[in-house]
């Protein structure tokens, strides 16, 4: 049997988290990533995703990509904007986890925001992989031009080189970077999805842990039942049919009129006494 007495009283959010981790029939897995408690795993996951998203956004706005050596300006800007949005959402999740009372109003909107932002980042990652794979000539030409410029800087100023073949293995570099970016995209998809599903469920469960505000505020008790006044029919004599058992009727059969328990109400109210 679940030893709930071992976790009472709840004094802070860590006691609530410890109780939730130990609850046998919880709708959450016991550990985030198999090793972190619920609260710690949600906090570290949100913090890691926020920091990584801001890093991706900073490199994108600096015209650099952590996955491709050469990527056009427009995809980089879109990738940076998506990561800024996702970084802000995950940072807001960190703030909500620090202040758990905010979950009573932000649990559902924050869970939806996490889902939509994650979907946008993942789709943009795979879109960049498809874009580079569908336009190999842009990547190869930029790679060859960069290699040729680095060679010309080390030669006399009067030297001009013209390369028509891939002496720098730009085609092989393109294949390697597509494999690298595709593998990273799949890994990010799996890890981010696990964290977001776990965090969204944990935030939704926080309201159960913290409890709802009682209907009667502090110092207010439930109204006493003694204040209720007796109703008019409280002194009516008991029914003469109270000890009779109902007859067993066949389907569709009804009671005769003389055996119906409901009779017209006696209009002579003087013989009834009303309690004051």
Image: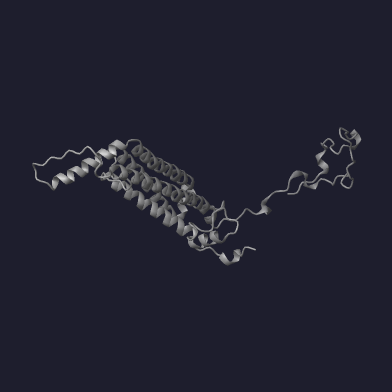
Residue 250 position, x and y percent, is 89, 36
Residue 190 position, x and y percent, is 45, 49
Residue 42 visible in this rendered orientation of the protein: yes
Left or right: where 183 falls relative to 264: left
Residue 66 position, x and y percent, is 32, 48
| Quarter of the view holding residue 269 | top right
Q: Is residue 8 above or below residue 201?
A: below
Total labels drawn: 0
What residue is drawn where x is 49% and y is 45%? 108
Left or right: where 89 falls relative to 213: left
Residue 174 position, x and y percent, is 32, 43
Which of 208/63 is in front?
63
Q: Single out the residue that lies furthest toward the bottom.
A: 6
Which of 44/171 is in front?
171
Residue 84 visible in this rendered orientation of the protein: no
Q: Is residue 13 above or below residue 182?
A: below
Which quarter of the rendered picture does the N terminus lie within?
A: bottom right
Here the colouring is: one colour
Which of 271/212 is in front?
212
What residue is drawn where x is 35% and y is 36%? 134
Which of 78/163 is in front?
163
What residue is drawn where x is 37% and y is 51%? 50
| Quarter of the view holding residue 148 | top left
């Amino acid at each position: 049997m679940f030893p709930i007495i071992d976790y009472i009283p709840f004094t802070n959010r860590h006691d609530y988290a410890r109780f939730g981790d130990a609850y046998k029939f919880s709708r959450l897995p016991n550990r985030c990533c198999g090793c972190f408690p619920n609260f710690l795993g949600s906090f570290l996951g949100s913090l890691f995703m926020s920091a990584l998203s801001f890093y991706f956004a900073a490199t994108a706005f600096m015209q650099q990509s952590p996955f491709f050596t050469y990527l056009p300006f427009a995809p980089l800007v879109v990738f940076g904007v998506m990561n800024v949005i996702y970084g802000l959402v995950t940072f807001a999740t960190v703030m909500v986890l620090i202040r758990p009372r905010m979950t009573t109003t932000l649990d559902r909107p924050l869970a939806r925001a996490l889902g939509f932002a994650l979907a946008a980042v993942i789709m943009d990652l795979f879109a960049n992989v498809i874009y580079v794979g569908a336009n190999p000539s842009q990547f190869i030409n930029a790679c060859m031009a960069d290699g040729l410029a680095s060679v010309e800087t080390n030669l006399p100023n009067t030297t001009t080189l013209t390369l028509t073949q891939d002496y720098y293995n730009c085609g092989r570099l393109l294949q390697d970077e597509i494999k690298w970016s595709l593998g990273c995209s799949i890994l990010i998809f799996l890890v981010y999805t696990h964290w977001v599903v776990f965090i969204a469920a944990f935030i939704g469960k926080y309201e159960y842990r913290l409890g709802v505000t009682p209907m009667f505020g502090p110092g207010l008790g439930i109204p006493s039942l003694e204040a209720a006044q007796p109703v008019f029919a409280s002194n009516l004599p008991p029914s003469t049919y109270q000890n009779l058992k109902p007859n067993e009727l066949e389907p569709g059969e009804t009671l005769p009129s003389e055996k119906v328990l409901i009779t017209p109400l006696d209009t002579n109210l003087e013989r009834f006494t009303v309690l004051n």
